């Protein structure tokens, strides 16, 4: 039997698109805040004009009503008085036509003109879908409760993911209808686990409102269907039973109840109550749902999520003997002339693979110039097709990026030279500086920067593979956004002005599989990063082969 909820909005049948233009970068959303402020001010003017118009109409109505009531007391003699006769004719020839003009007066023209000017800049439906799915991604990655998200109170959960001293922006409470619409987004994505969670929250917050089209029937209908798809037959039965109590005439609930009654008997080997025995017993407790039934749930991603949440999950046992080799020092790269007067504060934060953080490698003015150059060019970030080597858009990388070439601005060339000075590697075959801004729930799932053995495309023989990565953090992030290495348990929290550096290839030229890394979703804040991918051609005498394959 197909247990289908009714009243699905056709708009939600559109498939989620990964090429949405707005939600993928927060810097491209800032203008929406200012635009909404202008629209609110324009709406205030419209409301004021409408209130003025309504007050004029009310004044006219009050005056005419008073005269009309007086006339009806003595209808036959009222017009005997010449003033009454004059005023009656005046009202019909002058005042009622004027009233008609008032009512036809278009006070909305100014507001609608303003609206039409900016409407093309509105986010698309794909942006709306993407933002909703991003919210669900954050919920899973940071193990956020539906109730706390809806309450706008996530401080304790955010504290798990970030430093406590940064603070964060508060959000308003979500209404029952807000929660219902988040559930609908999950429904459109066939993610019934999140459908169930958000319909439960919508149900808990529901208050009857005769002016709204939001109904308890629709919540229960979707909740029953999601529970059924999650094989929670008992909860589906309870929701359908409640639906029948609320609306005994519901078109599908009677048939659904018969079906679920049989399913209950099969699963529990018990005789469940018949649909005509439905009683008003209340429906207050929430159902329980397993996340492993969520759409595209990957048990292997649990390590990645744990690293996004905490500094060091218990599954990684970093021994004291390994920790003592991790040091911080001022670094001149064998007294390089450009580093003698301005040494880099270098910290080794992990030993295998070796992972370094170079503190204050970029200054605030330098980062502002880079952002200013990149922002007009930001486009939805693409990944490399493992078969063709071409660029493709993907839902596992949500951000916008731009490429800055070293010849186009002296600052970009200066940054390139600084990386060469610090690493000792030639930048002749390095890729341009990639600048990235992450949007709502912006992330980059675990991946390798170098080519892996299962990738069939050929590398450019003049450049070779990506031997190393220099990743610059150009903003602090209030919560989330860490760079993590799931294979080994390493984790780097964004620090404005710092750069993270690691080798993607072993000295033998083989890819180092321990360098699989990910950009955790941004929970609160805007994350700006830039990176240089350094290629292996030209490094033959700068990073020589080792004696052992694992070096």
Image (cartoon, rainbow, N blue to C red):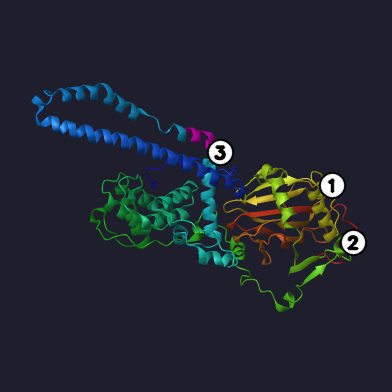
What secondary structure is marked by label 2? helix
State the image coordinates of residue 499 (x, y, percent, origin top left): 74, 60
Q: Which of the pair 114/514 is nearer the observer?
A: 114
Q: Residue at x 72, y 61 (%)?
A: 498
Q: Residue at x 55, y 52 (%)?
A: 134
Q: Is residue 287 visible?
A: yes
Q: Main secondary structure of the magenta part?
A: helix
Read off the residue under disc 3: 121
What secondary structure is marked by label 3? helix
Q: Earlier in the sequence, mark 2 or mark 3?
A: 3
Instruction: Identify the magenta region.
Output: 112-122
Q: Is residue 121 magenta?
A: yes
Q: Answer left or right for 424 relative to 182.
A: right
Disc on res. 461 = 1
Could you tell me which quadrant the C terminus lies in? bottom right
Residue lying furthest bottom: 320
Q: Residue at x 69, y 66 (%)?
A: 488
Q: Residue at x 79, y 43 (%)?
A: 408
Q: Earlier in the sequence, mark 3 or mark 1?
A: 3
Vertical relation: 316 (above or below) 57:
below
State the image coordinates of residue 448 (x, y, percent, origin top left): 71, 56
State the image coordinates of residue 483 (x, y, percent, origin top left): 67, 60
Q: Earlier in the sequence, mark 1 or mark 2?
A: 2
Vertical relation: 530 (above or below) 389:
below
Rendering quarter of residue 407: top right
Q: Nearer the viewer, mark 1 or mark 2?
A: 2
Contact check, label 1 and label 2, Cβ < 8 Å: no
Disc on res. 337 = 2
Q: Answer left or right for 206 relative to 485.
A: left
Q: CA distance from mark 3 to mark 1?
A: 44 Å
């Amino acid at each position: 039997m197909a247990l289908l909820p009714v009243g699905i909005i056709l708009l939600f049948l559109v498939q989620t698109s990964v090429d949405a233009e707005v939600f993928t970068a927060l810097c491209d959303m800032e203008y929406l805040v200012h635009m909404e402020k202008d629209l609110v001010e324009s709406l205030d003017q419209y409301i004021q004009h409408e209130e003025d118009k309504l007050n004029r109409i009310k004044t006219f109505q009050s005056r005419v009503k008073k005269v009309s009531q007086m006339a009806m007391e003595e209808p036959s003699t009222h017009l005997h008085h010449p003033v009454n006769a004059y005023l009656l004719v005046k009202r019909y020839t002058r005042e009622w036509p004027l009233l008609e003009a008032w009512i036809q007066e278009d006070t909305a023209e100014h507001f609608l003109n303003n609206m039409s000017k900016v409407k093309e800049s509105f986010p698309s439906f794909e942006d709306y879908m993407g933002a909703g799915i991003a919210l669900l991604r954050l919920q899973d990655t940071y193990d956020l409760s539906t109730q706390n998200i809806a309450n706008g109170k996530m401080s304790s959960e955010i504290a798990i993911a970030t430093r406590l001293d940064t603070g964060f922006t508060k959000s308003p409470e979500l209404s029952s209808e807000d929660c219902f619409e988040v559930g609908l987004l999950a429904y459109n994505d066939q993610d019934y686990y999140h459908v169930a969670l958000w319909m439960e929250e919508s149900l808990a917050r529901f208050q009857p409102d005769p002016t709204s089209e939001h109904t308890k029937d629709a919540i229960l209908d979707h909740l029953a269907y999601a529970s059924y798809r999650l094989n929670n037959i008992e909860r589906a039965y309870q929701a359908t039973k409640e639906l029948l109590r609320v609306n005994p005439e519901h078109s599908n609930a009677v048939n659904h109840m018969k079906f679920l009654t049989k399913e209950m008997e099969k699963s529990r080997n018990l005789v469940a109550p018949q649909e005509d025995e439905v009683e008003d017993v209340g429906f207050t407790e929430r159902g329980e749902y397993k996340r492993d039934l969520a759409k595209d749930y990957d048990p292997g991603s649990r390590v990645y999520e744990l690293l996004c949440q905490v500094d060091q999950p218990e599954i990684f046992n970093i021994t004291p003997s390994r920790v003592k080799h991790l040091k911080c020092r001022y670094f001149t790269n064998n007294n390089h002339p450009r580093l003698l007067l301005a040494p880099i504060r270098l910290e080794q934060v992990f030993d295998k693979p070796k992972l370094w953080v170079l503190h204050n490698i970029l200054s605030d003015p330098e980062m502002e110039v880079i952002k200013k150059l990149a922002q007009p060019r930001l486009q939805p970030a693409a990944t490399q097709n493992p078969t063709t080597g071409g660029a493709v858009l993907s839902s596992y990388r949500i951000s916008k990026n731009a490429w800055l070439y070293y010849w186009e601005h002296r600052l970009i060339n200066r940054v390139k030279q600084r990386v060469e000075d610090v690493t000792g590697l030639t930048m002749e075959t390095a890729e341009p500086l990639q600048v990235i801004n992450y949007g709502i729930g912006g992330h980059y799932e675990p991946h390798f920067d170098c080519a892996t053995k299962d990738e069939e495309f050929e590398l450019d023989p003049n450049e070779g593979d990506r031997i190393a990565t220099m990743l610059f953090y150009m903003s602090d992030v209030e919560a989330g956004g860490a760079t993590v290495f799931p294979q080994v348990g390493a984790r780097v929290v964004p620090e404005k002005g710092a750069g993270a550096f690691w080798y993607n290839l072993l000295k033998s030229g083989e890819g180092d599989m321990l360098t699989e890394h990910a950009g955790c979703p941004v929970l609160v804040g805007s994350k700006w990063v830039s990176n240089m991918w350094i290629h292996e051609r030209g490094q033959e005498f700068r990073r020589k082969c080792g004696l052992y394959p694992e070096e």
